[in-house]
Image (tube, helix red, strand yellow):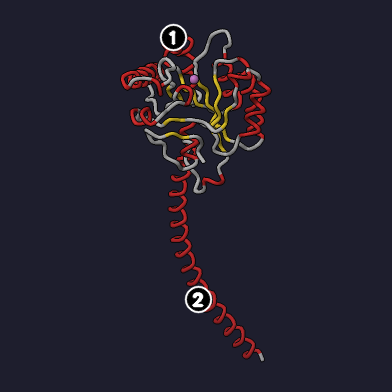
């Protein structure tokens, strides 16, 4: 019985050792695979990290599906106005307070002649807040009625004022009165940014109505038209930004909006929304 027991114990121990050895080999193999797998994952992780670094560094990179994006662009024409209404600076205050951006279509003359110091300061502040500045021509000409020479001069001078102040190349234009006929479009190699939400702020000069008009008509991809020359518009902006944020909208610049929706902006073309 003792011998048998010893044999059993020996056999058991041998089997146990053999099993341990085999499983050790398997474990070893697993470790190797695991290590290789891990290194692959780590590699992919690095690639992903590189891919995701871009959106973090620049919140404008489009996700894979444009349908999931809920963003709009607030746009302001005819400024800078740093006079009695303080509209441009009050709007910048509201944007800064809420950490959002907008696009300003500047009248060159306002920046260069009417508010040469405070206007330039406001424009630089806008750029420092991540806002975009496009041209609204030099002297707010109705380009549909202008000669080709005047069209060229209005755009060139309008852009130069902005570029001299901000040091940034102008990439967008909003034609005064939204007027850009075939001839105007053929002459100007900038994307013409129109709008799909007209707040009528210039007409009502009523903050509540401006807010109402925005909230009733805004959709993902919208471009909202306002004017940074009215105190009531600045009031409306202060009220409407939290409402839009509550509805889940991102408030971005026009260029960012089109990037988010995966759409290119091209010269000689008009755009009414990013949808
Ligand atoms: Ni205008």
- In this rendering, the count of numbered labels is 2
Q: For disc 2, does the CB lie below 8 Å from ligand 1?
A: no
SS at mark 1 in the image = loop
210 displayed left or right of 66: right
| Quarter of the view holding residue 229 | top right
User: Percent from the top left, x then y, of residue 94?
Assistant: 60, 22
3 displayed left or right of 113: right
Say above or below: 159 vs 274: above
Residue 212 in sight in this render: yes
Label 2 neighbour load within 10 Å: few <14, some 14-19, many 20+? few
Say above or below: 77 vs 263: above
| Quarter of the view holding residue 263 | top left
Residue 117 in sight in this render: no
User: Which circle, 1 or 2, is nearer the viewer?
Assistant: 1
Furthest toward the front, the residue is 145
Q: For disc 1, does the CB lie below 8 Å from ligand 1?
A: no
Q: Is residue 42 or residue 212 the one in the foreground?
A: 212
User: Percent from the top left, x then y, of residue 10?
Assistant: 58, 83
Q: Is residue 173 or residue 162 the one in the foreground?
A: 173
> Which label sits on residue 51?
none
The residue singled out by tag 2 in the image is: 22
The residue singled out by tag 1 in the image is: 116
SS at mark 2 in the image = helix
Q: Is residue 22 or residue 160 the one in the foreground?
A: 160
Nearer-N-terminus badge (1/2) = 2
- Rendered residue at 57%/35% (across/down): 250
Label 1 neighbour load within 10 Å: few <14, some 14-19, many 20+? some
Q: Are marks 1 and 2 in contact (CB under 8 Å)?
A: no
| Quarter of the picture holding the N terminus | bottom right
Say above or below: 154 vs 19: above
User: Percent from the top left, x then y, of residue 4?
Assistant: 63, 90
| Quarter of the view holding residue 138 | top left
């Amino acid at each position: 019985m003792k011998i048998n027991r010893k044999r059993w114990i020996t056999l058991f121990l041998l089997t146990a050792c053999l099993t341990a050895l085999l499983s050790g080999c398997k474990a070893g193999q697993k470790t190797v695979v695991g290590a290789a797998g891990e290194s692959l994952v780590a590699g992919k992780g690095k690639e992903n990290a590189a891919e995701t670094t871009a959106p973090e560094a620049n919140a404008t990179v489009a996700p894979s599906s444009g349908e999931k994006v809920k963003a709009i662009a607030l746009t302001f024409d005819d400024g800078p106005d740093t006079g009695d209404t303080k509209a441009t600076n009050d709007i910048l205050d509201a944007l800064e307070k809420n950490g959002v951006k907008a696009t300003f279509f500047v009248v060159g003359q306002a920046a260069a002649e009417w508010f040469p110091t405070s206007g330039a300061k406001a424009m630089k502040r806008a750029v420092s807040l991540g806002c975009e500045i496009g041209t609204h021509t030099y002297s707010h000409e109705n380009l549909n009625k202008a000669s080709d020479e005047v069209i060229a001069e209005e755009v060139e001078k309008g852009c130069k004022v902005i570029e001299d102040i901000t040091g940034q190349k102008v990439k967008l234009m909003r034609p005064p009165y939204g007027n850009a006929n075939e001839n105007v479009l053929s002459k100007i190699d900038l994307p013409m940014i129109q709008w799909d939400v007209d707040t009528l702020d210039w007409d009502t000069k009523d903050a509540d109505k401006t807010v109402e008009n925005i909230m009733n008509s805004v959709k993902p991809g919208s471009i909202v038209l306002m004017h940074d020359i009215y105190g009531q518009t600045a009031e409306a902006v202060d009220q409407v930004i939290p409402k839009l944020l509550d509805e889940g909208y991102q408030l971005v610049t026009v260029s960012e909006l089109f990037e988010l929706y995966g759409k290119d902006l091209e010269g000689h073309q008009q755009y009414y929304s990013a949808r």
